[in-house]
Image (cartoon, rainbow, N blue to C red):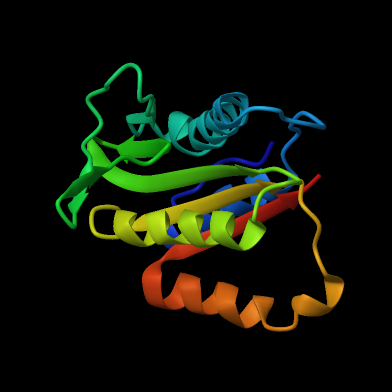
Amino acid sequence: MPTPRYMGISDFIEGLAGHLADASLRPSYREPLSLRRDVARQVHGFVESQLGPLGVPFYVWQHSRSSPSDLEPVAAFGRDFWPDIAVEVAEIPTIALAVKLIGPGDAGHHSLGSLLGRTLVYTRLYPAVLAFAWDKGPSDDHKHWWDPELRAELNDRYRIKLVIRRQ
């Protein structure tokens, strides 16, 4: 493993997105909670590999509707929004992650739209946001023409990194 080096938030989120795009995850998920747990483990492993050797304190939070945590919600439109996973570095909210399992029978456009909408709200508090989708639904290959431009705009304008894994 290469020696960790100091990196800015842009490099860090780029590295995390690449790690999640290639991470060993189960071949299939039936329920969102198990996907969120596995993604949280991968996030923790990546963050630890980068910040642990430098002695930088961090904490990876997992939000659960059934057990509230000390994770600070993002207030917007009269509601509280909690990321599925959040990373604090030196007690500062740094990265928010939204994780979505899209089933074969789901309306994929609604699921992806909801995921991206949630991540947009998180940008109010977090300097970097990552949207992670595990997509088991059908995908039309000819409808990916503008994907690179949309991904670049999400990243450049809103600091949102999008990772879509297909089963």
Q: Residue 20, relative to residue 107: is it above or below?
A: above
Side of 80 relative to 110 (left or right):
left
* Res 12 seen here: no
Residue farthest to the top, as pictured: 67
Residue farthest to the left, as pictured: 78
Q: Residue 165, relative to residue 42: is it above or below?
A: below
Classify residue 141 by image quadrant.
bottom right
Q: Residue 86, relative to residue 68: is it above or below?
A: below
Q: Position of residue 24 (x, y in %)?
A: 76, 33
Q: Position of residue 115 (x, y in %)?
A: 49, 54
Side of 18 relative to 100 (left or right):
right
Numbered disc total: 0
Side of 63 relative to 140 (left or right):
left
Classify residue 20 by image quadrant.
top right
Q: Nearer the viewer, residue 158 or 118?
A: 118
Q: Nearer the viewer, residue 12 or 164?
A: 164
Q: Nearer the viewer, residue 105 or 129?
A: 105
Q: Position of residue 121 (x, y in %)?
A: 31, 58
Side of 81 relative to 62 (left or right):
left
Please identify the quadrant where the C terminus is shown. Answer: top right
* Residue located 55% across and 59% down the image: 110
* Residue located 21% across and 36% down the image: 72
* Residue located 32% across and 30% down the image: 57
* Res 104 seen here: yes
Q: Position of residue 2 (x, y in %)?
A: 66, 41
Please identify the quadrant where the N terminus is shown. Answer: top right
